[in-house]
Image (tube, grey):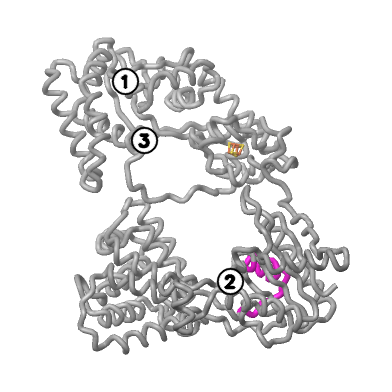
Amino acid sequence: GRLRLIAAASLEEEAEAVAAAVRRWLGAGRKRIALVAADRVAARRARALLERDGVLVQDETGWKLSTTRAAALVDAWLEVVTADAYHRDLLDLVKSPFLFSDWPDGLRPAGLVQLEAGLARHNLAYGLSRYEAVLAREPDGGEAVDMLRRAVAARQRMPRGTATPAHWLEGLLQALHELGAMPGLERDEAGAPLLELLRTRLEELSAVPARLTFAEWREWLNRELECATFVDRGIESPLVMTHLAATRLRRFDAAVLIGADRDNLAPAMPRALFGNLAVRSDLGLSLPTEAVARLRNDLAGLIASCGEVTVTWQIAHGDEANLICPELGMLAVFHDHAWGDDLVSSAGPAPGPAAGPGSGEGTAMPRPAAPQCVPLRLPVSAYASLLACPYQFFVRRMLGLGETEEVREALEKRDYGEYVHRILQRFHAGRTQLSGESDEKLVDALETISREVFAPAIEENFAEHAWLSRWLKRVPGYIAWQKAREAGGWRYAGSEQPRERTLVLADGDALVLHGRLDRLDRRADASEAVLDYKTQDAQGLRRRLAEPTEDVQLACYALLQGERVSEAAYVALDGEKPDELALQDVQEMARVQGERLVAIVHALRQGAGLPAHGIDAVCDWCEVRGVCRRDYQAEAVLP
Ligand code: SF4
């Protein structure tokens, strides 16, 4: 028949039904096809499906200018101005392809990488001039600094405080020019109308004396961009996306009306102003009955003037039923009475994802082998990663894929740990022995260093006082613990000590294990202790040491330091007093770990696979999770 009503169970089903109808019509040689978008979301999804098949759609309805890349650039720049160049806003801005179009190819991406890495390295969250000052000291940040200089210059073009709308617009245009965005915007389908809009408003408002704050002006500008539409005229296609009213008096070979439910096709009702029908009638304004009649006429006109019409709608939104619009519902009832067919059919199920959580299927556990990529120089942390999950080791150490560093706006637990390490290193560098000095004096000295180390973080964010207070509460306990160690014969002998040890593989090649000892103590008899500070509670560490062969870190540190080590312990610094948790049979454990490492590396070089078999506690914190697709592995292969 000429008319079909397709009931879809979901957005995806509806979009797929639309795309299927269009493909069928194109296959049958139809030349003019209308996609009548009552539901823009479903229409866009259908359009995406068609474009995936290489079928382009000529969009008559257009896009709001505010949704274009060009408007996103303006928005990103104004965000930079608003929030003193908050680092995320700045990176969003610099990622815009319109920027720095006067630079040779490759310079902008290089600058972006330098900028992103530089901000993360120095933990810079705000301030254009500050970014510039810090990165200018870097030896290889040339492009990033040039970018920042241009951003600073662009910022200077914008007024400060209040200004007339014309001044704000002028400042914005000059800033875009300074950022090298003009050529790209002029060439862009949406950029050109955006610039035209800005210039037109600048001209229109040049005589307006009212002064606006930045926030007021921006609100006005946002409204302008919301109201303006942009139509991409670069596409010519037999497929036209349009709206119902625009189909009047036009002929199409076929049309699909998308989202024809009672909400999307509700007749336009008069606004509250002059809502009284008698008043509206007297004033000659449109009445609800006319809106209903107009909708019916439009629907009838569409059906009459098109060779074939398919109507789609979703039968439910969430848990609620979603009815087809009453006019089409009535048509279905009449058709059923007259010819025993209500014209309604169901959309076929949309093709689902290949596999996913709950899909009942799953991918196989990855188990790559790469004997030629096995590194022969490993830090202790890499060995720990290899034991925790070989695939994690493969991705991190053999493929060299790591997480990008990000600016940390607030101190995290690991930063706190680093600060405490730094404080203790400075404290002991000036005092290798505490015995003989008063507790008050020592506490005072350690507190002073602590305040100095935390000062820059507190200057950035006053809330970091909480971390300092947390540490200061531990200071007296630490002094007492250190004195007790000295009474037991141990003397501080250094911290942050780099060490490495060469192991010999079965084929004679050398494997170098290396690491950095948090702290080394020594006794008069030359026996040694390797200590590792931990800013966590003792309970977790105790569990970690319950199975001594499973703890890699202390045993490997003992292996690195050598035969004189008689003690290896974690020092838990989170309680009132430090808690020492020692590894039993240190030298034996060091030997076991050394032999195990040699055997594993040998096996990997012989082609052994690296399965992704981390346990939950490891996977929960693993940045490689998206690569190993653990969440998509079949239940059977999960550990
Ligand atoms: S998520 Fe788990 S299984 Fe996957 S790589 Fe990380 S640790 Fe291994």
Q: Position of residue 294 (x, y in %)?
A: 62, 79
Q: Which amino acid, by three-letter code, is at mark 1?
A: Gly
Q: Which amino acid, by three-letter code, is at mark 2?
A: Pro
| Residue range (magenta) | 43-59
Left or right of 572, for residue 36 = right
Chain-order first, disc 2 or disc 1: 2
The residue carrying mark 1 is: 575
Front residue of this view, candidates 584 and 179: 179
528 drawn magenta: no
Do the residues bearing badges 2 and 1 touch, measured as CB atoms within 8 Å? Answer: no
Sort mark 3 into few (<14), some (14-19) or many (20+) by Cα contacts within 10 Å: few
Q: Which amino acid, by three-letter code, is at mark 3?
A: Lys
Front residue of this view, candidates 90 and 35: 35
Q: Position of residue 251 (x, y in %)?
A: 73, 86
> Residue at image x 40%, y 56%?
117
48 drawn magenta: yes
**In which quadrant of this rendering is ligand 1 seen?**
top right
Whole-angstrom CA distance, mark 2 to mark 1, is: 69 Å
> Residue at image x 62%, y 53%?
317
Sort mark 2 into few (<14), some (14-19) or many (20+) by Cα contacts within 10 Å: some
Residue 107 visible (yes or no) = no
